[in-house]
Amino acid sequence: MHLNRFCAHLWILLLSGWLIIACTAPEDEKPDRLIDIDKMADILTEVHMAESRVSRLGLASIDSSNIAYKHLETNIFKKFGVDTSAYRKSYIFYSSHPQDMEVIYKRVTENLQKKIDVKKVQQQAKG
């Protein structure tokens, strides 16, 4: 049952991302330190998982949720060796290039599906 809710939340996040993409002005020049597509997909996979974790915590305060998310986000950026500025500039650039963003989000969806499949196999092995 949690996987169905997870998938529903995932689709909401993905649709929100596409909505943001549609509302941003195009940026034609590649920014300095542009994160490559593969790495960006891996980062966004982790970002969406972090958002899901925080939402499942059920924290009463938005401030508490933001603090928890920022902590997870900092760890994600450290893991991938990027800083906030490079991530944001890369996200804005890819958001203004729908073909690239589509490739990225296809990979994000594939990455998340793989994680769900692994979880299912682990649960079946326990059960």
Image (cartoon, rainbow, N blue to C red):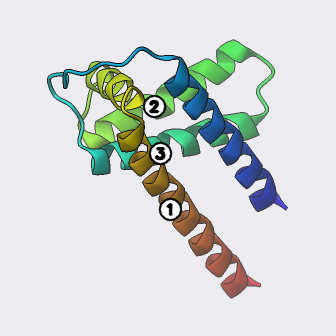
Question: On the rendered image, what quadrant is the N terminus found in?
Answer: bottom right
Q: Position of residue 73 (x, y in %)?
A: 45, 31
Q: Please name the residue shown 48% across and 54% down the image.
A: 106
Above or below, 125 against 45 in this view is below
Question: On the rendered image, what quadrant is the C terminus found in?
Answer: bottom right
The residue identified by callout 3 is: 46
Disc on the earlier residue, 3 or 1 = 3
Q: Please name the residue shown 57% across and 64% down the image.
A: 113
Mark 3 packing: few (<14 Cα in 10 Å), some, or many (20+)?
many
Above or below, 95 against 50 in this view is above
Return the mark for residue 1.
none
Toward the left, the furthest residue is: 32
Disc on the earlier residue, 2 or 1 = 2
Rounded to the nearest whole Å, what is the CA distance between mark 3 and mark 1? 13 Å
Residue 50 is left or right of residue 32, and the answer is right
Rounded to the nearest whole Å, what is the CA distance between mark 2 and mark 1? 21 Å
The residue identified by callout 1 is: 110
- Looking at this view, is 7 or 56 the one in front? 7
Amino acid at circle 3? Glu
Residue 28 is left or right of residue 77, and the answer is left
